[in-house]
Image (spheres, coloured by chain):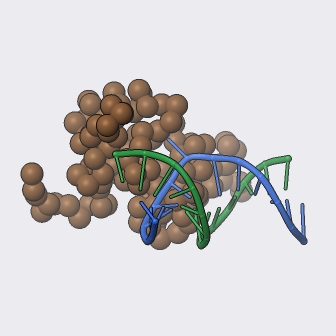
Chain colours: A brown, B blue, C green
Amino acid sequence: MSEESLPEIPEYAERVLEVAELIPSGRVMTYGDVAEWLDEGGPRQVGRVMALYGGAVPWWRVVRADGVLLPGSELRALEHYRAEATPLRTTGAGEHRLDMRRARWDGGNDSARAHT
DNA sequence: AGCTTGACCGACC
DNA sequence: TGGTCGGCCAAGC
């Protein structure tokens, strides 16, 4: 029998979304990191998935490697980062960017991480 | 069957 | 600090 009659979401996409849900509050993962964590696809594939189905998960926790806020949803993202106390940094132009060195999450291996 | 596009990345200058 | 270049992988036209 058929499994689902709802809009078919590729399994790869479901995995990506699953990882997005795993990212703890106040932390972020890059598109590339998610792809590596899944050991499949690439940053662009993850980006595509997020563009299509990201609305169903904490999309603001999946970001670009350079820490630039999601174009078009910067304000929305910024609100979340502030609420979650995600490490941010400000550029010379006064633009808000993520402090990737501190905000980047390795996937659950940071239990003993510490440094201020 | 080939070219363009995209919520990308790292290296270089 | 910031811009450019080449590489990357899949979907659309």
Q: Quadrant of the N terminus of chain A?
A: bottom right
Left or right position of A108 against A42: left
A47 vs B11, nearest the viewer: B11
Visible residue check, residue A76: yes
Residue A88: x and y in percent read 27, 40
Q: Position of residue B6 (x, y in %)?
A: 63, 46
Quadrant location of residue A7?
top right
The answer, for residue A56, to whether it is visible in the render is no
Q: Is residue A78 above or below residue A3?
A: above
Q: Position of residue A13 (x, y in %)?
A: 56, 54
**Residue at horizontal 67 percent and vertical 48 percent from the top:** A8
* Figure check: A32 above or below A6: below
- Viewer-proximal residue among A69 and A53: A69
Residue A39 vertical position relative to residue A72 in the rendered view, above or below? below
**Where on the picture, by quarter, is residue A26?**
top left
Give A80 or A116, whichever is nearer the viewer. Answer: A116
Which residue is at 37% across, 53% downward?
A29
A64 displayed left or right of A81: right
Residue A86 sits in quarter: top left
Q: Nearer the viewer, residue A77 or A50?
A: A77
The residue shown at (43%, 31%) is: A74
Residue that appears at 10% across and 57% down: A114
